[in-house]
Image: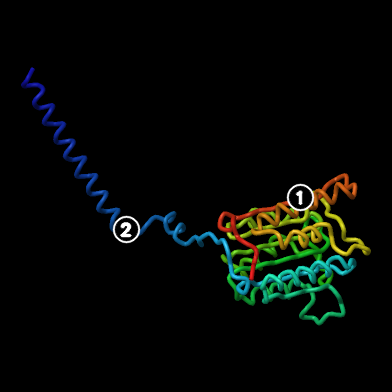
Amino acid sequence: MGSVEHPRMFGRLIVLALFIAIATSCTSDVTGVSPPTVSSKAVAVRPAADAVPAGRWRAILIAGDNNSPAFDNGVQSLREKLLNHGVSDIAVYTSNWHAEPGQRATAANIAAALRSGGGDACFAFITSHGEQGGFFLRSDRRLFDPGSLDRVLNTGCGAVPTVVVVSACHSGTFLTSAMRKPNRVILTAAAADRTSFGCGAGDRYTYYDQCLLQQFDNAATWRDLALATRSCVENLERRMGVRKSSQPQMFVGAQVESLRLPMR
């Protein structure tokens, strides 16, 4: 019995020794190579942002149509809000034909404004008529679609914290997978299949813009503002007897979950 077990034990020791040698060899080979792709991407991810000084924000405010005063009124009132909060780098675009060409809400001017660079955070506010294909730019007589907005934001804002507000009918169409980047906050006045309200010739503001302006000073973060604005719109629509609510939408990226509004 003993003469049989001894060769078996000896064989097991040889196998164990070979296993240890192979394991040691693999470890030393891995030590000398570059980190895997996943680790490289993790290092490149921009850290989460909680606050950006007001003076380092860059804002682009766009009134896409002029057949209602509500759009330009919303832009001008939001400009005053931002100035009061300490934001000074503000570009305003209108669809008023009396405006200078460089101040008109055209796709070329919007792209140029975003490409101008500067700042540590971007804010883009668009208020206009909209369809499921995008928001309307009367100066261009065309729709500005989600893919175009994503491209100009990529070029002009890159990886910095970026807040986008699209106040238009069917504006939920801008919550595409491409638009949902970790450094972005996106607020829309309506779901993709819903209209929004308050853009008639006699309206001072759209419902969504009115609520956004009302809630702006009391909100700490952009998430807070989105939630408060949505609640305000829902209450306003109930009071006005709206049967099919607009259902405002929001997306908050992982890097900007606690991003604060600009403050002095």
Q: Which residue is at a point 69% across and 72% down the rendered structure image?
A: 111
Q: Is 193 drawn above or below residue 72 in the view shown?
A: above
| Image: 253 above or below 148 | above
Q: Provide residue 4's location: percent of width, then percent of height.
A: 9, 21
Secondary structure type for disc 1: helix
In what element is the residue under mark 2? loop
When asked about the image quadrant of residue 210, the answer is: bottom right
Residue 225 visible in the displayed image: yes
Q: Earlier in the sequence, mark 2 or mark 1?
A: 2
Which amino acid is tagged 1? Ser
The label on residue 231 is: 1
Q: Quadrant of residue 204?
A: bottom right
Give the quadrant of the C terminus: bottom right
Residue at left offset 16%, top offset 39%? 17
- The answer to whether 173 is drawn above or below residue 95 in the figure is above
Residue 131 or 162: which is nearer the viewer?
162
Q: Is residue 191 visible?
A: no
Look at the image and name its color scheme.
rainbow
Q: Which residue is mark 2?
A: 33
In the rendered view of the protein, which quadrant contains the N terminus? top left
Horizontal side of residue 24 vs 78, given as left or right:
left
Q: Residue furthest right?
A: 202
State the residue at coordinates (56%, 61%): 50
CA distance for labels 2 and 1: 54 Å
Q: Picture coordinates of residue 161 (x, y %)?
A: 59, 64
Residue that lies at the very extreme toward the top in this rendered image: 1
Residue 144 placement: quadrant: bottom right
Identify the amino acid type marked 2. Answer: Val
Q: Report x, y in % for residue 86.
A: 66, 73
